Amino acid sequence: MRSGFVTLVGRPNVGKSSLVNAMCGRKVSIVSDKPQTTRHRVMGVLTRPDAQLVFVDTPGLHKPVTALGERVNATALESLADVDVTCLVIDATKPFGSGDEWVARHLDMARSIVIVNKIDAVKPDRVVAQLAAASQLGAADYFPVSARTGKGIAGLVEYLVGRLPEGPLYFPEDTVSDQPEEQWVAELVREQLLAVTHDELPYSIATRVSEWEWPRIRVEIIVERDSQKGMVIGKGGSVLKEVGRRARLQLPEGAFLELFVKVDKDWQRRPDRVERLGY
């Protein structure tokens, strides 16, 4: 039995969460096309007869301008300690550049691998160009993959298993994530908010479960301004109703989900509020 921890790091929106979901074979982390969707460190667990891989999904590393940004950057960097394999994920659809190089400087690239994700969205010559540009990093290996289609995922997983040491099961065989149920539901609601609200809202939204008495679950949606509250609720409650409908589809049958919108002025710029919201 081989077992160990594999951390995925990279710039925002390169597809780290989608990769973790693809390698685990089920949804572990929320995903969206908005940068910095992931704010917590989330572990996804893949257990096979011969191995247990614990994938560590991290927030995208970026230049922070708020207390929230500083906190999620710190979460990502802290996730680099005491892991067996580090994967630098880059986006095949974006030019390889200073942002990727900045992330790479935080890694021991000789022991890390580079994953070029989203190869389904570009032509083969673009993938070759990305791999050539990333070769300057001197990584241990390079993998072009598509989390969306699954291309290259099986080979990547086999390689990662080979990099793990012999060891015990770190989680029970039926575990797929280390997330508490309350956090999972709160993140699920935020995922659906990102899917249906305006582009100016993603960074201003936080979610948390305030009450849990199954089957009744109450989730607070925190925004920074009164004008944002109106956007989240929508005309006649239309946005909130759609978010609730989408979230319920992914919850166990019988769940009763209540959504409540609350204004907490400039919360993401206030370290005390960021901490209180669990970041």
Image (cartoon, grey):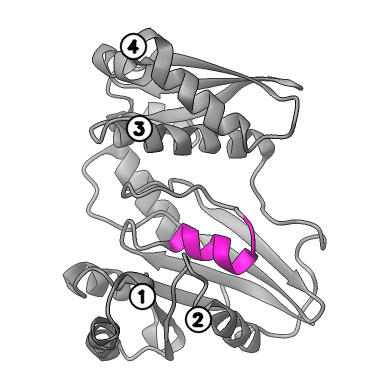
CB atoms at circles 1 and 2 under 8 Å apart? Answer: yes
Check disc 2 and report its element: helix, strand or loop.
loop
Question: Taking the image as drawn, is residue 79 in sight?
Answer: no
CB atoms at circles 2 and 3 under 8 Å apart? Answer: no
* Mark 2 crowdedness (10 Å alpha carbons): few <14, some 14-19, many ≥20: some
Rounded to the nearest whole Å, what is the CA distance between mark 4 and mark 3? 33 Å
Residue type highlighted by circle 1 = Ile
CB atoms at circles 4 and 2 under 8 Å apart? Answer: no
* Mark 3 crowdedness (10 Å alpha carbons): few <14, some 14-19, many ≥20: some
Would you name the residue on which mark 2 appears? Answer: 152
Would you name the residue on which mark 1 appears? Answer: 119
Mark 1 or mark 3, earlier in chain: 1
Q: In which quarter of the view is residue 45 placed?
A: bottom right
Q: How far across and how far down the image is residue 254, in percent?
A: 75, 25
Question: Taking the image as drawn, is residue 40 in sight?
Answer: yes
Mark 2 or mark 3, earlier in chain: 2
What residue sits 38% from the left and 84% below the top? 109
- Point out the stretch of residues depicted in magenta: 16-26
Classify 222 as above or below 42.
Answer: above
What residue sits 49% from the left and 77% below the top? 151
What residue sits 51% from the left and 68% below the top? 7
Rounded to the nearest whole Å, what is the CA distance between mark 1 and mark 2? 10 Å
Which of discs 2 and 3 lies nearer the camera? The answer is 2
Q: In which quarter of the view is residue 262 placed?
A: top left
CB atoms at circles 1 and 3 under 8 Å apart? Answer: no
Per the image, is 235 magenta? no
Residue type highlighted by circle 2 = Gly
Mark 1 or mark 2, earlier in chain: 1
Would you name the residue on which mark 3 appears? Answer: 271
Residue type highlighted by circle 3 = Pro
Would you name the residue on which mark 4 appears? Answer: 235
Rounded to the nearest whole Å, what is the CA distance between mark 4 and mark 2? 44 Å
